[in-house]
Image (cartoon, grey):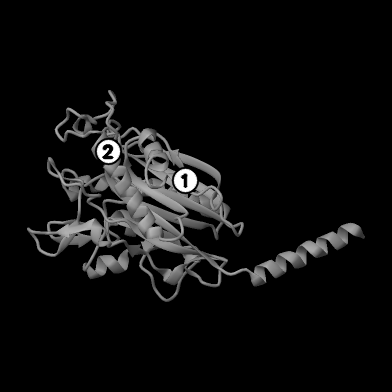
Amino acid sequence: MRLYIILLILFFSTHLYSQNSKPESYTIICYNVENLFDCKDDPIKNDQEFLPKGKKYWNNTKYQTKLNNIARVITSIGKWKKPILIGLCEIENKHTLDGLTKYSGLKRLRYKYIHKESPDRRGIDVALLYQPKQFKLINSDFFIISMPSNKRMKTRDILYASGKLPNGDTLHVFVNHFPSRYGGEKKSKPKRVYVASVLKSKVDSIKRLSPKANILIMGDFNDFPTDTSLKDILKAKKLNENINEKDLYNLAYNYQDSRKIGSNKYKGIWGMLDQFIVSGNLLLPENSLFIKKKNMYICQENFLMEDDTRYLGKKPKRTYIGYKYNKGYSDHLPIYLDLIIK
């Protein structure tokens, strides 16, 4: 009898809490920070350019400025509330992540991070910063890419993490940095198609176990939403009125279609290489976890931009223009979304 009463009390208290608690908004960021290198030589990586005696004369002063610049971007997007998750591309190693989380403007925000050295020849990796109280880590893994057509070709791993959110829901997160377009789009296309097939297999394995899993895919894909790797292999769709909770949707389509702004600018044309791709159930407001207005955003703060003297308009303010130190941020603009948790 006593156990029955206790269970009733727990049921009604939980029910009342769910009725009275207000939905909370949590920001998630994805940012290619462009060459966040420390100043130390790694003999097994091609990091010579970013050394004190390298071609760019990279030193501790410039490195600390870069860390503080990235921290400024993150706090600017988060405003009064710290972002819950931050996917990063082009960080060199654990040392740079320690520098960012412990010795920059982020140090008081107490981020933890997930990272592993990848086999990328330049030494640039992906990482995920997270707030441990809001994203209680369940599991993490790294999927190594081994190109069937070229075993010697090395690229970034795919980072995977799952965690419990404040309402008890589980969120599955993938952070990606697909192979670059070096050598031309057509020649390099098969590499990105293959990485997309690996990513698709990992997503499908989650869906087989949990068809309504909450899946969030982010990163610099070095492809646009309409390209084969994302549209045909990953099968990330454009938003429409009839959302299927089991399908994947690419939130970057609208920006790609308009071309008025993008996450990067190449020869005067804005494009969306950086994207959020989500499972359909994250777009349904009736669910306990959903993306606000089904939107992602591009951070376009004035301090991130500079005049594009060659192609007119504005462009992202980079750390370097060639070998000239520019005191900027990145050749990519960060993207973000607001996740509503009931």
Return the disc, 1 or 2, that comes first in the chain's sequence: 2
- In this rendering, position of residue 157 left or right of residue 266: right
Residue 182 position, x and y percent, is 18, 44
Q: Could you tell me which secondary element the residue under label 1 belongs to?
A: loop
Counting other residues with Cα less than 10 Å from the Cα at mark 1, is it few (<14), some (14-19), or many (20 or more)? many
Task: Check the picture and name the quadrant holding the N terminus.
Answer: bottom right
- Foreground residue, 243 or 259? 259
Residue furthest left as drawn: 310
Circle 1 is placed at which residue position?
Answer: 111
The residue at the point 74 percent across, 65 percent down is 13
**Secondary structure beneath disc 2?**
helix
Marking on residue 143: none
Disc 1 residue type (three-letter): Tyr
Of residues 303 and 146, which is closer to you in this image? 303
- Horizontal side of 227 relative to 102 (left or right) equals left
In this picture, residue 169 sits left or right of residue 290: right
Q: Residue at x 37, y 33 (%)?
A: 95
On screen, residue 88 versus residue 35, left or right, reads: right
Check if mark 1's residue and mark 2's residue have beta carbons within 8 Å: no
Vertical comparison of 47 with 287: above or below: above
Question: Picture coordinates of residue 150 (x, y %)?
Answer: 27, 34
Density class for disc 2 (Cα within 10 Å; few <14, some 14-19, many ≥20) is some
